[in-house]
Image (cartoon, rainbow, N blue to C red):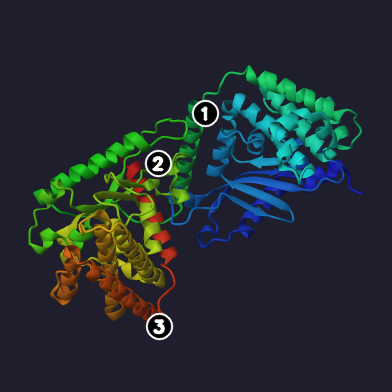
Amino acid sequence: MATQEEINKTIHSNENIQNILINHIKNRKITYYLVNQFILLFAQLGGSWAFNLNIASSDFDYFGVFSANYSIFGTVVPPPKTIESNNPDCVAYEIKFFIELLLKRNPKLLEPLWATHYCWFNESFENLKNLKEFLLGRNAAHQYLGFAKSSIKSNIKQKNKNNSNNSNNSNVNENLLEIVAKIDPKNHYKILRMLLEAKRISLNQPPRVWFEGEERDLIIQVRQQKIPNVAQQIIDLLEQVTNLMNNMPHDNDDITFLKLNEWLINYRKKEIQENLLCEPIPFDKATQIVFQNQSPLYLNLFDQIQQLLNNNNNNNNNNNNNTVINYDQKKLLFCSISGSKLNELSNDNNNNNNNIDQQNQSNNIDVIVIYAQSSNSIFSLSNNNNNSNHSTIISNDPNYNQSSLMTTRGIVAIELSHACELIVAGNHRLIELLFLNETKAQQYVLLETKCWQHLKQNSIKFLCQTIINHYIGVASGLLVRANSFLKKNNSNNSNNLNNDDFNASKKQLFIAQKLIYEIDQFLKSNSFIICYSNEQFNQQMNQLLEIKNLIDQQMIEQLIIKANESLNQIKIQTKQLKLPQTVDKIWLNNWLISVRKSIFLEELST
């Protein structure tokens, strides 16, 4: 029978642990873009083995930290934060998520920074380990104490399933000795270890992740139920740690954030530079301007766009601790007139009045801006674009609603990754800009770069069922709202047909009917109506403009009914379409990666 020492040298060698984690991550690649694109930074035999607290029955758990290379580019679909598998139990954390949990002082994530046994790590992770002292202090002690208390509370809930009120703090204090005494001995040893670590940190010492000597003997004996009065020891430790922690100074979280953020940015830069040396040069000069409208009528718009982006740099580049990050220089990739002006359905279009500057001054012009964050911002902890939230949309519309881009007026600036997400979702305000013909582009586009031009040239890749479903779904929802506003107007017994409810109903109907015309045209010709002034679409344009000027409530009701009938016919026709179900995400993702890489190369050269 092999000795313990022989087992440690073979099965649990650092090289073997590393290979187990690498195979674990490879086997769990469930997304198309993850193939062979990760770097293992840290691998460890976890569980009780990691603390030298294993016994004969201890199983094997593996813990790792990896870097998903593609994640630094803010791609269409974010990388997984963790990858988990069973048999053996393995969990690996993507480096950004790992650091986010470090900042919360999660004990499970803190301890690997002090690990020296049964682990492997590369030079980059060693540099991160050198920052571990910044993570010690009151917050870390609080987390360890919190984990111990949570273990106790979870046992209370289990013991009192029929009375959840028994888990409140007053009952915990009242029956603490009795409750702790009844806890499973396996949990006794875990709680005891957490409290011993919390006590060390409260005394300005690092956690002892590898137990030896008397402390190890104590915990092992507790685990084997050989120590009496364990409950009393736990209660005494709880009181000691609480008193020690209350006398600790508060942590300087701003400095800790800046240190870890700097490490992450520098690591990402080093990683991408090394990769670019081994790869063909990507999309060359992605942000090179290929068209810019030189008309003086657009100068005021450009000034407002730049001011909007600059204000966002100053106001919104903060982390949760209010630490200002000033490195973001946004790059304009595309700007275009949008909304009724682009569709040639506004009053000034109808009157052939092209004084855009005058229109802008009266706040009647809409502009879509696509911008790219700097590489530093993409790499940063304070960047949330991988969470697919709407913080990457910037608008000067005082009524801007993050839940609806459709109703946002004025200038709307969208970060590149989120713009790609909207394209994947079939958002009509983005789709129409991809199918704008060159003649109209010369008239309504303010600025276009090489990368956006390339995207437009491949717009056929975005014709799919998702876009059709988006147009139908949005139009259907708008008609429901139009009818709702009309009923609300009736319930108020209002004779004023210009009140808010009536006008809101007309607006919903107008947009819904426009989308119905556009999807109907797509079904007929495989193309969208963008500009209605074309003689071919005069009838549709006149009908839409009539909706704007309607004062007859019965006519609105009839048009809503008619629009719903048209929509139902379209739904029947779309079932016969032979289109891809979704946008070509692989192509779009690769395009986005190439743009991000090109921007990074441009930044290196400046």
Please tell me which residue lies in front, 565 or 51: 565
Question: How far across and down, in percent of the image, does residue 323 sit?
Answer: 43, 30
Please tell me which residue lies in front, 498 or 40: 498
| SS category of the residue bearing label 2 | helix
Label annotation for residue 377: 2
Point out the residue furthest to the top here. 247
Nearest to viewer (mark 3 / mark 2): 3
Amino acid on which disc 3 is placed: Gln
Kindly indicate the quadrant of the structure image that contains residue 328. Answer: top left
Q: Is residue 161 left or right of residue 326?
A: right
**One can see residue 570 in this view:** yes
| SS category of the residue bearing label 3 | loop
Residue occupied by mark 1: 256
Q: Are marks 3 and 2 in contact (CB under 8 Å)?
A: no
For the residues marked 3 and 2, what is the alpha-carbon distance in whole angstroms? 45 Å
Amino acid on which disc 1 is placed: Thr
Label annotation for residue 519: none
Question: Would you place residue 552 above or below residue 173 in this image?
Answer: below
Amino acid on which disc 2 is placed: Ser
Question: How far across and down, in percent of the image, does residue 206 sit?
Answer: 67, 25
For the residues marked 2 and 1, what is the alpha-carbon distance in whole angstroms? 18 Å
Label annotation for residue 576: 3
Q: How many marks?
A: 3
Q: Are marks 3 and 1 in contact (CB under 8 Å)?
A: no
Kindly indicate the quadrant of the structure image that contains residue 65. Answer: top right
Question: How far across and down, in percent of the image, does residue 171 sit?
Answer: 74, 32
* On-image quarter of the C terminus: top left
For the residues marked 3 and 1, what is the alpha-carbon distance in whole angstroms? 58 Å
The numbered mark, 3 or 1, whose residue comes first in the sequence reads 1
